[in-house]
Every structure is written in structure tokens, then in C-alpha cells.
Amino acid sequence: MNSPSPASAPQRPSVIQLAIKEKGALYAAYIPLFAEGGIFIPTSREYRLGDDVYVLLTLPDDPQRYPVAGKVAWITPARAAGSRAPGVGVRFPADEKSRQLKARIEEALGGSMASDRPTQTI
């Protein structure tokens, strides 16, 4: 039998459900530096830059789940400096749904967007 090796099989995007319950947690996870926005996802699973990730995101005080087909844009490894949580930064795609999600997150964060409080991101 000649079956394709797992390395040559196309990788399906992993699916991550992320429910952010508090505004402070949303502030710590949101990545405004990406043009379309992005989110930090704490995980010990290994990813590579550019990996496709499908995120089902729930925001504080919002029953809707937002599906995002993003890409891993940075990685915080386990045992990172500054006791940062391991995880990945997922960049939102350049589409209308992402623009609406970015606007929804920034609206939820309001004045805290200009805060100097540390985040889990850059």
C-alpha cells in the first residue's frame, strides 16, 4: 500500500473556540497593530507562522460567536520572557466580516484602547 505521508497531506486549519468573558481579558488579547485586527489565543499547541487557524470568538456581553479564518502572525513560546502566557497571535483576514469584528471589539474597549496597561501582545 502506498498512502501519502502526513507531511504531504494538506493541513486543515485547526479550530479554536475562544470565549472572552471580561473587557480586561479582551483588552489583553486584542491586537490593534494588525491592519484588520487580531487576537491572542493562549495555547500550548505548537503552530508555525502562517498556519491557518479558524477561530470561533465570543466577546464579553455579546451572545454572538464570530467566525474568523485567520493566520498565525506571531508565536509566544512556552517559558517566554516576562512570564508571558504561551500562545499565538492570529491576524484577522482582510474582509468585511473582519472589519466589522474589529469595529465591534474597539467599540467594546472604548477608552481603554489608549491605556498603557500591559497586554499579552506587542
Image (tube, rainbow, N blue to C red):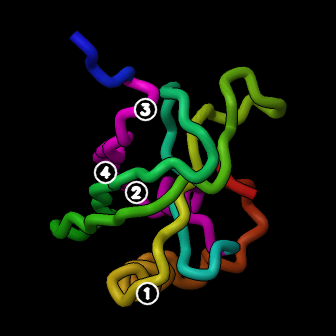
Q: CA distance from mark 3 to mark 1?
A: 34 Å
Please state which amino acid type lies under the numbered disc 4: Ala
Query: Mark 3 highlights which residue?
Result: 8
Image quarter hosting the N terminus? top left
Please state which amino acid type lies under the numbered disc 1: Arg
Left or right: 2, with 78 as reference point: left
Q: Nearer the viewer, mark 3 or mark 4?
A: 3
Q: CA distance from mark 2 to mark 4?
A: 9 Å
Seen at 54% across and 64% down, the residue is 91
| SS state under label 4 | strand
State the mark number for residue 38.
none
Toward the right, the furthest residue is: 81
Please state which amino acid type lies under the numbered disc 3: Ser
Toward the top, the furthest residue is: 1
Q: Which residues are magenta?
A: 6-32
Q: CA distance from mark 1 to mark 4?
A: 19 Å
Query: Mark 1 highlights which residue?
Result: 99
Query: Mark 4 highlights which residue?
Result: 19
Image quarter of residue 69: bottom left
Kindly tell me whether residue 78 is visible in this rendering: yes
Count residues near mark 4 (Cα–Cα under 10 Å), then give few for <14, some for 14-19, many for 20+: some
Q: Is residue 87 above or below residue 28?
A: above
| SS state under label 3 | loop
Among the two numbered marks 3 and 4 on one chain, the one whose residue lies closer to the N terminus: 3
Left or right: 86, with 118 as reference point: left
Q: Nearer the viewer, mark 2 or mark 1?
A: 1
Q: Nearer the viewer, mark 2 or mark 3?
A: 3
Q: Is residue 100 magenta?
A: no
